Image (cartoon, grey):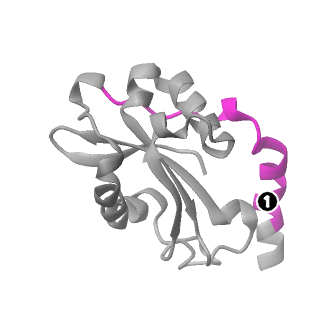
Amino acid sequence: MKMLYILIITIPMLFFGSIHGYAQPKECPVLSELEKTSIKDKKEVIEALNTLIPKTYGTGLDDFPDMYTKWDVVTAKPFLKTVGNKDDEDYFGMAKTFCGKEIAEKSWLVRLDFPKAPGANLAQGQIFLAKSKEKGWFVWFRYH
């Protein structure tokens, strides 16, 4: 049963996972509400993930209830710092397409690895973060 579940999730991701246009954020952040950040805020971002990841991913799926309880940060940087790095720069393009250049330039890319996940597609996560002047860090888009 677990294998069937993995196949049901994995096969569609193989066909649709590379199409950037199928996913959209529910709503874009409001530019005037965002705080300017820099790479100096990385430690703060990493600490905020302890709250943001459980809110964004939960703990797991029925067959894998603790799948998202452990994670490794692959990338955590402002989108402006992704320029020149092909693995990360494509996400900057997505952020600009979704919500505009100004929002993207005040946002961060966080790429995650979930070692308890059963397959490569479920084991990778990408979230776009920004910092609200009033409420602190928040996820405005989850790609995987």
x and y, in percent, of residue 95 in the image: 52, 31
Q: Amino acid at mark 1?
A: Thr
Q: Residue at x 59, y 70 (%)?
A: 114
Q: Is residue 17 left or right of residue 85?
A: right
Q: Is residue 28 visible?
A: no
Does the segment drawn in magenta span residue 21? yes
Does the segment drawn in magenta span residue 19? yes
Write down the quadrant of residue 118 in the picture. bottom right
x and y, in percent, of residue 144 in the image: 61, 52
Q: Is residue 5 visible?
A: yes
Q: Residue at x 77, y 78 (%)?
A: 2
Number of numbered discs present? Answer: 1
Write down the quadrant of residue 130 in the picture. top left
Q: Residue at x 55, y 33 (%)?
A: 92
Q: Please report the bounds of the magenta region as a residue range.
A: 7-30
Q: In this figure, which residue is indicated by the disc labeled 1?
A: 10
Q: Residue at x 35, y 54 (%)?
A: 42
x and y, in percent, of residue 82 in the image: 54, 39
Q: Is residue 91 left or right of residue 17?
A: left
